[in-house]
Amino acid sequence: MLKKNDEKINGFLLVAVLPFLLFAMAYYGFESSYVRLKTMEKAPDFMFASVYAYRVIPNYLSVHVTEIVTFFVNNYIPFLKNFLLKQGTLFYHSIFLINSFFFILSSVVLHALLKLGALHLTIRRMIHLLAIFFIVIIQYVPTNCDSIAIFFYLWGALLTLKYLEKRKPTDFILLCAVVFISTLARETSCLNISFFAAMCIDFEKLKNKDFTFIKELILLVIAFIVPYAGLRMTIHQDVSFVEGIYFLDNFSSPFNLSGLLFGIISLYFSYLLCNDKGRVLIWKYLFFAIPYLIMIAMVGLFWETRLFLPLILTGIVVASHQFKNLIPKQ
């Protein structure tokens, strides 16, 4: 009984406390030179213009959590206001609270994903910590949407694996709901479709006209397209799809090239940890993620390594599920 309680405490420290401390260090231990959120008094106008306007969940939370934090500080802890303002604006603290909340939820889901892979406890903890460090290190580009998007992406990956293992319709229905809702946060939700396709589609079976899972895949695509198109018909912007074309910048700037190299090496690292089956899965995932890769090359900036984070975490998850063939359970 004591050993079980110790394990729960250790799990809580690893899954919640340590990630939160690392996240707080990233936001308050050093200041980003990329996005000046720390000095902004309220949600900036660019969050409601161009492609950012379609990220309605993060934008809604940014506005209303800031209002709640401001009301709470002014009415309940006014004696701490000067101290808080020295560390950043109330808007910045609100972004930190939102992001840290979804970051911890991401850590909890990641823990469940690794546990599903039946890893040895020690290995599972090491991989979990590695994934957490990857998420934290990309916070030099703080945004109001990435932590939310990563949480939904990992949750979708967990539901995919559970559905493929137990074939419960409720898991698939919930997966469709996650894709639908997460599209309201960021377009990264499309990668859940890539992950599902990589896990369930066998090219050899397709050659033999075995179209199993195609219906499920179509439903997932619909769950993505409906909110994606709906947002663009409802929210009218001068630029509906992209903020700019950065293809040449991505392959000419040393910063962008280093960001690209970071993404490639990080994914290659997890690729090396996989056995042959896991490596095939990663190649299949990258194949189905080609539209996303093209988009980040065209309209994203490679220096924003947050764009590669879903790919890196996918590699880590796939690698962890291959370890179970090599390492005994505990």
Image: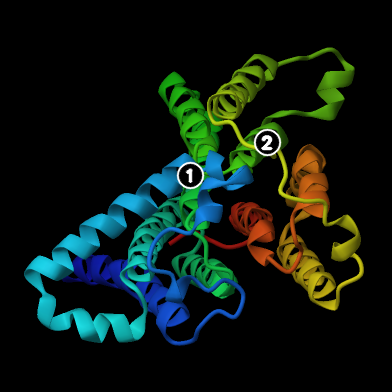
Mark 2 is on which residue type?
Ser
Residue 277 in the image: state x and y as whole percent.
Answer: 76, 47
**Residue farthest left in this picture:** 76
Residue behind mark 2: 240
Residue at screen point 33% across, 64% down: 94
Q: Is residue 18 left or right of residue 177?
A: left
When the figure is inspected, residue 188 is found, relative to residue 37, above or below; the finding is: above
Residue at screen point 23% across, 72% down: 6
Q: Is residue 147 left or right of residue 269?
A: left
Residue 186 in the image: state x and y as whole percent.
Answer: 56, 44
Q: Is residue 190 visible?
A: yes
Residue 38 in the image: state x and y as whole percent.
Answer: 44, 75
Q: Is residue 193 left or right of residue 118?
A: right
Residue behind mark 1: 152
Mark 1 is on which residue type?
Phe
How is colour applied across the structure in the image? rainbow
Q: Is residue 117 visible?
A: no
Question: Which of the marked residues, 1 or 2, is nearer the chain's N terminus?
Answer: 1
When the figure is inspected, residue 16 is found, relative to residue 152, above or below; the finding is: below
Q: Alpha-carbon neighbours of circle 2 within 10 Å: few (<14), some, or many (≥20)?
A: some
The kind of secondary structure element at disc 2 is: loop
> In the depicted view, which residue is nearer to us: 7 or 69?
69
